[in-house]
Image (cartoon, grey):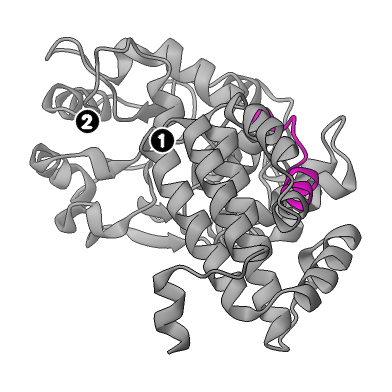
Amino acid sequence: MQFHEVVGQLDTKTKLLTQVAENRISHAQLFLSPHGAGNLALAIAFAQYVLCENKQAHDACGVCAACRKVQKLTHPDLHFSYPFFAKHKEDTSETFISQWRTAVLKNPYLDIDEWRTYFDEDNKQANINIAECHRIIKTWGLKPFEATYKILIMWLPEYLEKEGNTLLKLIEEPPPNTLFILVAHRAEQVLTTILSRTQLIKMPALTQAEISQFLMNRPQVSAEQATQLAYLSEGSLQNALQYLRQEESDYFQLLSEWLRMCFANQGLKITSFVEEMSKMGRENQKNFWRYALKLLREILLVKHHCPQLTHVTEREKNFIANLSKAIHTPQIEALIIEIEKAHYHTERNANPKILFLDVSLQLVKILMFKILPKEVQNIIA
Ligand SMILES: [Zn+2]
């Protein structure tokens, strides 16, 4: 992984390059970023840069022997530690290294749920166990094999329990030329004893523009689809990739048709819509609800004369303008409440057919008959 393959995070890349250029690499660093913002990808790119035998000013060379090994995650001086779903108490990260290489090479933005899919169903609890801490201490005592540096990337130290304290001495009195990178999303869940001994490198969520640019570079993603997915992704490339995998449906098309049929109380059309939606799979249904919520909130903003519609597409803009004239604020608020409830029930495995039919009927009430649920009546009163 080279720096140029990591999406966004320009400030952090500059900081890391400066550490190397000025020869002051902190031996223990915590790469903290929100979910899907690329802290693992950047840790690997940084490791590759440190190990590269022919460093360029802004990136690793990508072709030297060290780079080629890092690119396969097989460099003998680059070690990984991560939570795993152990079967036996003597299992360590080493037990699962081939799954790890496959998973990270496929998607360096992966999260714990994606990582879980590489294990058998019956292993539910992930952690970084005491056997793993002992393994780290043992390998850390060895000299680097090939490079001048020896690097350990620990993914999700949030999963270290109190046995993690056995690593403190190692972090406090590191052997020379070692680099320990912790890659975390929630600082408050990392052992404070470890936290206080590391240099914090904090990264922001990705911007919509960065995600949309990334998606546009992928084959078969239109500019409009990229904008729509980036808008939904909330700064997470992992979310964007998940949406992309599931994206066969055009949420805008579905939502605008649905609202129209509910507006006009077109029973037959509603029934076939319910059929279609109930078959599309839970993740896709949740995405549809989230998309609907985002769009409705935009309409509220327009109603309150604070349009910030820079991230919506042309057809969404027109739709929002028309709908904001046709319905009143309490109706939009009522729609939002219904769809939030639907999202909640979808997450809890409600029967999709019954759910979609029920929500559609609520929407008919709100849009056509202007009957509002109690929650909204209370707001108006
Ligand atoms: Zn190189």
As drawn, the label of residue 4 is none
**Residue assigned mark 1:** 151
**Residue assigned mark 2:** 127
Indicate which disc, 2 or 1, sits on the residue closer to the N terminus: 2
**Majority secondary structure in the magenta region:** helix
The quadrant in which residue 160 appears is: top left
Residue 313: give x, y in percent of width and height.
85, 59
Give the residues in magenta.
245-258
Q: Is residue 111 visible to the viewer in this orientation of the structure?
A: yes
Given this view, does label 2 or label 1 mark the residue nearer the observer?
2
The three-letter amino acid code for the residue at tag 2 is: Asn
Image vertical order of residue 69 relative to residue 10, above or below: above
The quadrant in which residue 366 appears is: bottom right
Residue at disc 1, secondary structure: strand
Is 253 in the magenta?
A: yes
Apparent side of residue 128 relative to residue 297 in the rendered image (left or right): left
Q: Residue at x 73, y 80 (%)?
A: 302
| Label 2 crowd bin: few (<14), some (14–19), many (20+), radius 10 Å | some
Residue 334: give x, y in percent of width and height.
53, 68
